[in-house]
Image (cartoon, coloured by chain):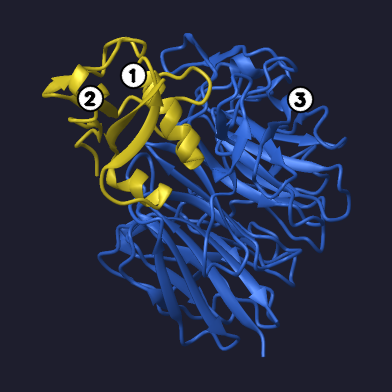
Chain colours: A blue, B yellow
Amino acid sequence: MSKVRVLAGTKKGAFVLTADGKRNKWDVSGPFFAGWEIYHMKGSPVNPDRIYVSQTSGWFGQIIQRSDDGGKTWTAPGGGQQKSPQGWPMGESNKFVYDAAAAPLTTHQWYDGTQHPWEFKRVWHLEPSLTDADAVYAGVEDAALFRSTDGAHSWQEIPGLRGHGTGPAWQPGAGGMCLHTIVLDPADPNRIYIAISAAGAFRTDDGGKSWKPINKGLRAPYLPDEDREVGHCVHHIAMSPQRPGVLFMQKHWDVLRSDDAGDNWREVSGNLPTDFGFAIDVHAHEPETIYVAPIKSDSEHYPLDGQLKVWRSKTGGNEWEALTNGLPQQNCYVNVLRDAMAVDSLDDCGIYFGTTGGQVYVSPNAGDSWQPIVRDLPPVLSVEVQTLP
Amino acid sequence: MSKVVLVEIPFHLRTLAQVNGVLQLEVSEPVTIRSVLDALEARYPVLCGTIRDHTTLQRRAFLRFFACSEDLSHQSPETPLPEAVAAGREPLLIIGAIAGG
């Protein structure tokens, strides 16, 4: 019988939640890396027991952890030694150094409008390769894309993105200037989509050598040029692997879709009660069925009227229905962050999301009803799910 | 020439390096913050980048260096540490700022 493994990254550690295909009895293990912020953890589609973790701390910086047994044990792949030019053995990984030789370290816009140098802070998102368990991409703050081809021992920047030329116009969102979304195209290994707050979405069609902004149709009210090429606060992008090229986006404001690989976007917020939010995902088997978790903003960042609702569209947007069965409908003031929603690929598609209140919810029936897997974790930063044989 | 130096690192770094208690490190002379950190990172490579930046070697902002009741955080990493530290009688304390949520 199939089973599922949910990977929950929280503000104070990582948790692994497992259940059989019925998804109603759960085993919880963790916390792993207790006390550290786990921005993201994700398993390799090639070898599901290979899990990569971004472990980060304002005190101690960035660590990458890896499991090769489905989350039972962990190692920091870069904990090994290599020779430095001076002869001292040095750590191999956990080292994200911008490739200044390939793309000069220029500046980006700072909050006060001045220019600010690129400084590495943390890894927001890890995206394992679809074809090689040792290959994994990392989206980092300040925004750049890195890749490892040796199982996270060492990391090299893909400099074409940062060197795109619009960098001086990129600016940090409230959470920093982060590359938070990486979408790999299963039909074209040279095509990758990424998103940066607040620069926008970009696409490469040549494996990362060159990138183009794909923000046509996104609007940035209050800016002098509302239709500018970059400067958009994209919160997340989702794509059905069954239908590459059709993308769904939750922007700071607006839910949008593109039917041409991001070349053009149109708003599909429709009857959503608020089009602000962070998370968005697509049903595993129905590429026109999408999910969002609308949040009240500006700055409140909790559900409208204290009622936690996931909204589902079965028409690829515009027409939305509220999903509330099993979710708290009073006194609920949590947020659902951008990487905190996921879907499994069982026949009855399961939908999962985590909250800043420490709950992880599952719907084993595509959103019709929900139940908490856990209620009292630290604030949940990310949720991924693996469907296992 | 080298000396055995005592070093105490924060709880989270002890966990990361899978060590307990005060560390004893063989450090090349002169015994400075830089030579101690070189020795610490050589022995426990997973700590590279956690105390000082990988590239600039600047101390991470929320960490401090103390020894013999003195705050040594702002002195040059090339400055010789107190004789009691170099002689292994007193530890170099690497302390995480007591702040945050």
Report the mark closest to the observer, 3 or 2: 2
> Residue A364 placed where, x, y %?
56, 81
Q: Disc 2 and disc 1: Cα gap in Å?
A: 8 Å
> Residue A320 placed where, x, y %?
58, 64
**Counting other residues with Cα less than 10 Å from the Cα at mark 2, is it few (<14), some (14-19), or many (20 or more)?**
many
Which residue bears the numbered disc 3? A160
Q: Quadrant of the N terminus of chain B?
A: top left
* Dot 2 and dot 1 residues touching (CB under 8 Å): yes
Say the numbered circle drawn on residue B31. 1
Q: Quadrant of the rendered structure where residue A202 is?
A: top right
The answer, for residue A250, to whether it is visible in the render is no
Chain containing the residue with disc 1: B
Q: Nearer the viewer, residue B25 or A198?
A: B25
What secondary structure is found at the residue carrying circle 3?
helix
Determine whether A372 is above or below B72 in the image. below
Report the mark closest to the observer, 3 or 1: 1
At 46% from the left and 82% from the top, the residue drawn is A26
Q: Counting residues from the N terminus, which is met first, the one under dot 2 or under dot 1?
A: 1
Q: Nearer the viewer, residue A211 or A324?
A: A211
Residue type at tag 1: Val
Which residue bears the numbered disc 2? B85
> Residue B28 placed where, x, y %?
41, 22
Q: Disc 3 and disc 1: Cα gap in Å?
A: 43 Å
Chain containing the residue with disc 3: A
> Residue B4 placed where, x, y %?
32, 31
Determine whether A233 is above or below A2 in the image. above
Q: Nearer the viewer, residue A318 or A283?
A: A283
